[in-house]
Amino acid sequence: MMQDMNCTIAAKPPLLDDVLFLDGISRSGKKLNCRLLSQFDGIEHFNYISVLENTCYLHHLGQISAEAASRFVRLNVDEASYERMIGRRLNTRPSDESSILRSANPDEYSRRVQAPDGADAVEAFRATGRTLLYHTHSVLPFVSVLFEAFPKLRFIHVGRNPIDIAADWLSRGWGERWNDDPLAFSTPAESNGHKVPWFAAYWPDDYIASTPAERCILGVMTLQKMERDAISYLGPAQRDQVLQYRLEHLLTDPQQVIDAISTFTGRQAGAGMSTYLESEKLPNPSLLERRNEFLSALAADARRNLVEQLVEAGRQYDTETQNPGTLPH
């Protein structure tokens, strides 16, 4: 019989300090931006491990302390980083943007499969000076957890107009899929007897009573407020470790984004950058011309006052400062 013990998750010895995260709300263009980052010399092709963000969501739901969350995040990122160093569990599905087959240098990852593992692999990776890149969804509201795990991290956040995100959510069924789709892998919550997305755990009755379009609008505006609040709590030193820019910046003037990333990371754009921009048809401001269409689709299934709130949020987003690195906070 086990006796009662006062125990928690212990901190592990760190594997690497140089870790880069790219974050944003779902449908903010993160994968496009992750692949852009991977075109910089010395930045790894991006990796995605869902346990990172889901641990943060569990902390938000009160299921795990901030200390335990940060230590569990560190454990899982270190393990995934080691596996990347030795070429283990590489994604080779050609259609996935995270596939190493779509990286700037796929041969580099294939080579690691045959290279030594263990401490030798770690030292060999450290000697290259390369930076590991992780893709996350809506982790900015919990960036303090990441700072506790990785005090020297660098964090890039990509924003997008809330009207465009909400319409994209609606078109992909996210006004209903959170509750019913077995392929929705983001942590659900149960609150007041209702099953809702983790971000709606503190307003479950409103979520359940809303239409699919209203759920998308409320969800996006909730997440963007959580992002603004998180940034406002950071001190000056940590704020300097965060770069924010908008998807709209990349679509209209990718060079300003490239310059901002280069300054922030200390890395130069690689030889394949121009080919990447051409393959993604960047710049492409025409993608921003569907705002009225998006708004009409949402308004057809949402209360007028809620649509007006969304329009105002979109107006504020568009009129505030437009320089990369200075997204309003």
Image (spheres, rainbow, N blue to C red):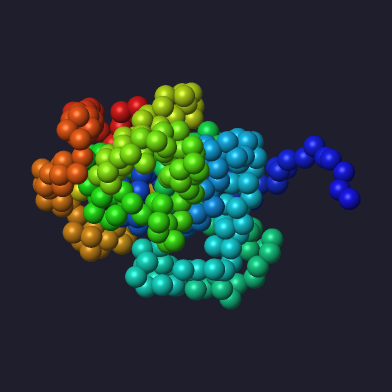
Give the residue at x 44% y 29%: 230
Q: Out of 242 and 54, give the one closest to the viewer.
A: 54
Give the residue at x 36% y 39%: 207
Query: Would you say residue 151 is visible in this rendering?
Result: no
Q: For residue 324, what is the image quadrant?
A: top left
Give the residue at x 11% y 51%: 286
Query: Would you say residue 215 is visible in this rendering?
Result: yes
Residue 278 at x, y percent in the picture: 20, 61
* Quarter in which the C terminus is drawn: top left
Q: For residue 87, what is the image quadrant?
A: bottom right
Left or right: 310 as drawn, with respect to 17: left
Q: Out of 50 and 124, give the one closest to the viewer.
A: 50
Left or right: 267 as drawn, with respect to 254: right
Above or below: residue 134 compared with residue 305: below
Give the residue at x 41% y 72%: 93
Residue 162 at x, y percent in the picture: 25, 39
Left or right: 53 as drawn, with respect to 247: right
Residue 28 at x, y percent in the picture: 30, 47
- The residue most toward the bottom is 114
Left or right: 89 as drawn, with respect to 285: right
Above or below: residue 261 compared with residue 116: above
Residue 54 at x, y percent in the picture: 52, 48
Tally the marks: 0
Q: Out of 151 and 305, give the one closest to the viewer.
A: 305
Q: Out of 302 and 279, give the one closest to the viewer.
A: 302
